[in-house]
């Protein structure tokens, strides 16, 4: 899985993190297109950046690889995975667009609230759980902030929970922000 | 039975955010407390923005003895007072150590609440109107977690506030 964004995030925030490593902490916030993750970002900004000890804030977005869009096709009883190159390309471009929008929406939310935090964005490719885990390790984040969809136990087992995986496998403390009560069913 | 060492003032007063930190005897929860203090309560002249509540859940003597195994049930009644005294002692030790660590925090409350850790913590969050709960994690794998139960898992799903799970980093990285 290539992480084209992670390398540039490391380069961008590497300089700043080095300067203020002792004073502040480096916070990574994982976002996707959902409202909950934006709410998590807002919560983190309101409650953690308030402290003003945050040296850098990195928004990470994991973009599912184009493999997701390759469906097996049964032909004469044999299942093969068929995906024309052009389709993959356009899928990838559409995904890139969406990722860029998600990250820029998140960065806007940062700008609106606090001008004093260096917020950078990173787009990672591949399976969300592993990509975020690896990125957090590479950028030596002090804290990872996630939203939570508030799934029940059964849905969680079937749909898979990124926040569950990251809580167990991330190398740094993980903060899980619940949806606000108004959204609770 | 909660013994409160300080007043639990109404949240939202002076715009401070309340954090509940869960503590037991394990190294992992002390590490979580120290990490939280280091990053959120540093005493470098900065005005402290958060209120701290340290909660230790003391298991009831009956549940602790029950865990030891079915063979003990016959003599259980005799053992209970000793178990109870020992549990109280260990909770006191935990709170004393916490007090030492939190010496520079201006607004800290220390509590020992009896009951199962999962419920105690969720209820403490409600009581303090906390915006955040901090728990350590033993770092169990999936099987141990299923057998022994995981307080941090339960809390992250059931607490009504943000939950921060602090793990001791593995030394071999």
Image: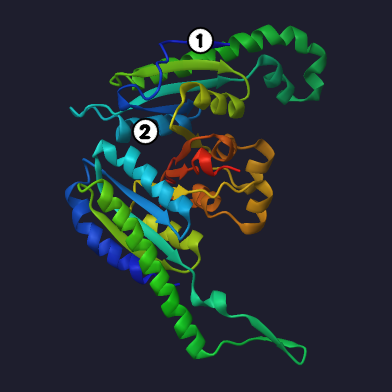
Which chain is disc 1 placed on? Answer: B
* Above or below: residue B94 compared with residue B15: above
Q: Residues within 10 Å of mark 2 (few under 14, many from 20)?
A: many
* Point 43% across, 10% down: residue: B5
Q: Which residue position holds label 1? A: B3
Neighbour class for label 1 at 10 Å: few (<14), some, many (≥20)? few
Please name whichever residue, B78 or A74, is drawn nearer the observer in this view of the structure.
Answer: A74
User: In the image, is A7 to the left or to the right of B33?
Assistant: left
Tag 2 or tag 1, which sits nearer the N-term? 1
Please state the chain letter of the residue tagged with numbered disc 2 in the rendered image. B
Question: Looking at the picture, does residue A157 appear above or below residue A54?
Answer: below
Tell me the residue at 36%/52% (across/down): A28
Q: Is residue A149 left or right of residue B144?
A: left
Q: Residue furthest bottom?
A: A76
Q: Secondary structure at mark 1?
A: strand
The residue lying at 75 percent from left, 7 percent from top is: B78
Asked if residue B95 is positioned above or below residue A10 in the image, the reply reads above
Which element is circle 2 on? helix
The answer to which image quadrant residue B31 occupies is top left
* Residue located beneath label 2 in the image: B36
Q: Pinpoint residue B50: horizontal percent, then vertical percent.
A: 33, 28
What color scheme is it? rainbow
Disc number at residue B68? none
Q: Is residue B96 above or below residue B16?
A: above
* Alpha carbon distance from label 1 to label 2: 23 Å
Q: Nearer the viewer, residue B123 or B76?
A: B123
Q: Are marks 1 and 2 in contact (CB under 8 Å)?
A: no
Q: Please tell me in which quadrant of the rendered image residue B41 appears.
A: top left
Q: Quadrant of the N terminus of chain B?
A: top right
Residue B160: x %, y % from top left = 53, 34
Q: Is residue A139 visible?
A: no
Q: Position of residue A7 (x, y in %)?
A: 31, 67
């Amino acid at each position: 899985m290539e992480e084209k964004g992670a390398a540039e995030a490391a380069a961008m925030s590497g300089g700043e993190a080095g300067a203020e490593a002792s004073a502040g902490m480096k916070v990574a916030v994982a976002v996707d297109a959902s409202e909950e993750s934006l709410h998590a970002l807002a919560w983190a900004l309101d409650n953690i950046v308030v402290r003003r000890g945050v040296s850098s804030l990195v928004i990470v977005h994991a973009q599912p690889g184009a493999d997701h869009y390759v469906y097996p096709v049964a032909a004469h009883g044999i299942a093969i995975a068929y995906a024309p190159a052009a389709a993959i390309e356009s899928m990838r471009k559409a995904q890139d667009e969406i990722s860029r929008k998600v990250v820029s929406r998140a960065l806007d939310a940062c700008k609106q609230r606090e001008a004093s935090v260096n917020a950078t964005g990173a787009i990672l490719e591949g399976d969300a759980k592993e990509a975020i885990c690896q990125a957090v390790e590479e950028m030596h984040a002090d804290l990872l902030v996630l939203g939570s969809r508030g799934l029940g136990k059964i849905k969680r087992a079937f749909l898979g929970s990124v926040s569950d995986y990251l809580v167990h496998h991330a190398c740094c403390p993980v903060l899980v922000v619940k949806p606000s009560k108004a959204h609770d069913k | 039975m909660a013994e409160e060492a300080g007043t639990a003032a109404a949240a939202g007063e002076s715009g401070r955010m309340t954090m509940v930190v869960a503590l037991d005897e394990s190294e992992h929860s002390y590490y979580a407390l120290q990490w939280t203090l280091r990053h959120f309560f540093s005493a470098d002249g900065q005005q402290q923005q958060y209120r701290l509540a340290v909660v230790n859940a003391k298991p009831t003597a009956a549940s602790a003895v029950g865990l030891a195994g079915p063979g003990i049930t016959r003599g259980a009644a005799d053992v209970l007072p000793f178990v109870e005294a020992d549990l109280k002692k260990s909770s006191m030790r935990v709170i004393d150590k916490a007090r030492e660590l939190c010496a520079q925090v201006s607004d800290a409350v220390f509590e020992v609440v009896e009951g199962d850790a999962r419920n105690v913590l969720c209820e403490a969050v409600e009581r303090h109107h906390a915006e955040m709960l901090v728990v350590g994690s033993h770092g169990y794998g999936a099987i141990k977690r299923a057998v022994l139960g995981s307080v941090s898992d339960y809390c992250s799903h059931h607490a009504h506030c943000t939950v921060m799970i602090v793990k001791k980093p593995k030394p071999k990285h």
